[in-house]
């Protein structure tokens, strides 16, 4: 997998219909009885954006994920894509994703070439509508984590998402006695599950199309 052909593929593919919920549901956590979780929220969902940033290092296409610090919140300690909520100064959710990534992992947003986006994704746990933005950097970013929001930055290879041995399932004790059976990606010995895994699952479907086209 090389960056330039991948970028060319994305520029065309992201203008077409996305796999959407069918792909998301492949990594959907469920209760032990096999049903999904339903969340009740008051008020409209907040909008946000996350960035899936591809770059090439020593011939390997990689992308950054962040490990959030422990805090009193729904996503404490989880692995996530850099991103966050839209602010009034953001023209759109693409700008939200770029700004948040710059703040969280220290990239220069002007160095990112945006190729498009995946399907908008509703995160029920936190009542957010998230747009996953796809971009590339033509040089290895100099990552600088914001220590208030980022415990660690990991940089898995994109090809690891396609490795079936890295897709696993385990039980998770989330809170209030809820035990979830959750699919996850095992990336650099980190458990990537929940909303992040579901968004990446749509990416996996598209990356598989790229692999087929390259053969």
Image (cartoon, helix red, strand yellow):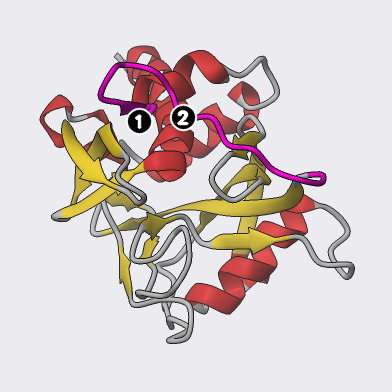
Percent coordinates x, y for residue 170 in the rendering: 16, 36
* Residue 146 badge: none
- Circle 2 sits on which residue? 37
Percent coordinates x, y for residue 93 in the rendering: 76, 51
Which element carries disc 2, helix, strand or loop? loop
Where the C terminus falls, by quadrant?
Answer: top left
Membership of 35 in magenta stretch: yes
Percent coordinates x, y for residue 14 in the rendering: 63, 27
Mark 2 and 1 residues: CB-CB less than 8 Å, in contact? yes
* Residue 29 badge: 1
Left or right: residue 89 versus residue 136 is right
Badge 1: residue crowd in 10 Å (few <14, some 14–19, many ≥20) = many
Which residue is located at x 23 percent, y 59 percent? Answer: 58
- Residue 214 vs 114, above or below: the answer is above
Left or right: residue 11 versus residue 71 is right
Residue 171 sits in quarter? top left
Residue 106 in view, yes or no:
yes
Where the N terminus falls, by quadrant?
Answer: top left
- Judged from this view, the residue extending furthest toward the bottom is 147
Q: CA distance from mark 2 to mark 1?
A: 8 Å
Percent coordinates x, y for residue 210 in the rendering: 41, 21
Membership of 172 in magenta stretch: no
Which span is picked out in magenta? 28-44
Towards the viewer: 203 or 159: 203
Towards the viewer: 142 or 176: 176
């Amino acid at each position: 997998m090389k960056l330039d052909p991948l970028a060319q593929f994305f520029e065309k593919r992201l203008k077409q219909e996305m796999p959407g919920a069918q792909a998301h549901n492949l990594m959907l956590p469920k209760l032990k009885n096999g049903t999904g979780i339903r969340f009740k929220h008051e008020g409209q969902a907040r909008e946000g954006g996350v960035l899936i940033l591809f770059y090439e290092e020593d011939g390997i296409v990689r992308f950054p994920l962040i490990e959030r610090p422990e805090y009193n919140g729904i996503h404490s300690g989880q692995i996530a894509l850099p991103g966050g909520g839209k602010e009034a100064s953001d023209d759109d959710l693409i700008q939200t994703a770029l700004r948040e990534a710059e703040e969280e992992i220290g990239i220069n947003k002007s160095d990112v070439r945006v190729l498009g986006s995946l399907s908008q994704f509703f995160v029920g746990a936190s009542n957010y509508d998230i747009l996953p933005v796809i971009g590339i950097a033509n040089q290895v970013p100099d990552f600088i984590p914001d220590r208030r929001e980022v415990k660690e930055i990991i940089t898995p290879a994109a090809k690891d998402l396609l490795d079936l041995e890295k897709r696993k399932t385990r039980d998770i004790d989330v809170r209030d006695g809820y035990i979830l059976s959750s699919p996850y990606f095992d990336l650099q010995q980190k458990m990537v599950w929940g909303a992040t895994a579901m968004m990446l699952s749509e990416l996996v479907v598209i990356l598989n199309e790229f692999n087929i086209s390259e053969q």
